[in-house]
């Protein structure tokens, strides 16, 4: 196939580009480098099956030639208020990527009779009152909270995707992505893993918010990409959770990182963040297992070990 990936220079988009190229497809990357990095796709510069367009998907997009599939992964995603590329500091751009960007990509998919796959997020569940979260759960989201620019952009994108499927018969799929980690992550992402792993490699005490009882589930990027590709090749139209159902507290995670990195600096507890920060997060992957025959394979310890060399390189420790 000839596949367009928006957000191709991002963490997930670049790994998807690698995988789809290895599967024998031609990949067209598109990114405006607001959050993505040219470094993530530099190794593809000489690949004859990879081409790249610097574009903002919120504007009109055009790709010459036939396109068989479109994977829409372009969006700020970092919850770090200190990050210039996070959605707190790019609120309008975030909502435009979810609304106008999704609309432009769906329009292109309709015109090209192409498969469309939307990268959605576990954040559409908000601070969940149902645990673990199945795709049938409608969520607990504050539409005017500070995180809403990302949460609601993705919720709108899902609604628009299903409207194009139902009204225009576009072949669509929706993946709800849970916490993912691995090489090419933004070290300033603001999420638990990059924060804690960076501190550990620098020999600093790990910062845990509150008592660390809030939970997350961490999926290694190779597992996630396998699930997304299976969904791309499927005929499933309704949202599918892709993530690791193994739940652990942030405190347990911090302790595991200190053990793996042999960091002796310990843990520092600080005041909890915003009350809207989800306290529990774990996917119900029953549908992914039943429909896609997918489940994660890489244990957290192995995934962290695979991620460490990239972090060391970025920190100048390699």
Image (tube, helix red, strand yellow):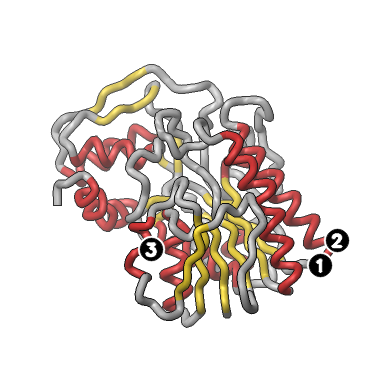
Q: Place residue 249 in its image quadrant.
A: top left
Q: What residue is shown at x 63% (from left), y 50% (from top)?
A: 58
Residue 128: x %, y % from top left: 61, 35
Q: Residue furthest right?
A: 167
Q: How far apart are marks 1 and 3 (CA)?
A: 33 Å
Q: What element carries label 1?
A: loop
x and y percentages locating residue 315 in the rendered image: 21, 44
* Position above or below: 151 against 246: above
In the picture of the structure, the residue carrying the numbered disc 2 is 167
Q: Is 276 situated left or right of 106 in this image?
A: left
Instruction: Specify the label residue 41 is tagged with.
Output: 3
Q: Residue 139: name its quadrant.
A: top right
Horizontal relation, residue 112 to residue 128: left or right: right
The residue depicted at 39 percent of the width and 53 percent of the height is 37
In the rendering, which numbered label is found on residue 169? Answer: 1
x and y, in percent, of residue 60 in the image? 67, 56
């Amino acid at each position: 196939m000839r596949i367009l990936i928006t957000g191709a220079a991002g963490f997930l988009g670049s790994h998807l580009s690698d995988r789809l190229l290895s599967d024998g497809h031609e990949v067209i990357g598109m990114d405006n480098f607001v959050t993505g990095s040219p470094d993530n796709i530099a190794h593809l510069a000489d690949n004859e099956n990879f081409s790249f367009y610097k574009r903002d998907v919120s504007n009109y997009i055009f790709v010459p030639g036939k396109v068989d599939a479109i994977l829409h992964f372009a969006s700020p995603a970092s919850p770090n208020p200190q990050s210039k590329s996070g959605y707190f500091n790019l609120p309008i751009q975030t909502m435009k990527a979810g609304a106008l960007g999704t609309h432009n990509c769906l329009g292109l998919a309709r015109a090209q009779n192409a498969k469309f796959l939307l990268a959605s997020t576990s954040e559409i569940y908000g601070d969940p009152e149902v645990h673990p979260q199945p795709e049938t759960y409608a969520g607990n989201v504050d539409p005017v909270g500070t995180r809403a620019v990302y949460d609601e952009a993705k919720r709108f994108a899902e609604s628009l995707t299903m409207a194009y499927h139902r009204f225009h018969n576009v072949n669509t799929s929706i993946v709800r992505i849970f916490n993912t980690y691995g090489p090419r992550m933004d070290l300033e992402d603001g999420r638990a893993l990059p924060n804690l792993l960076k501190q550990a490699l620098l020999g600093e005490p790990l910062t845990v918010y509150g008592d660390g009882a809030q939970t997350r589930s961490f999926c290694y990027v190779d597992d996630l990409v396998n699930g997304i590709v299976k969904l791309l090749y499927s005929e499933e139209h309704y949202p599918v959770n892709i993530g690791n159902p193994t739940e652990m507290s942030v405190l347990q995670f911090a302790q595991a990182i200190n053990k793996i990195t042999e960091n002796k600096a310990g843990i520092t507890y600080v005041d909890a963040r915003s009350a809207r920060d989800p306290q529990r997060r774990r996917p119900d992957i029953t549908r992914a297992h039943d429909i896609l025959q997918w489940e994660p394979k890489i244990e957290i310890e192995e995934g962290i070990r695979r991620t460490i060399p990239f972090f060391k390189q970025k920190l100048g420790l390699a």
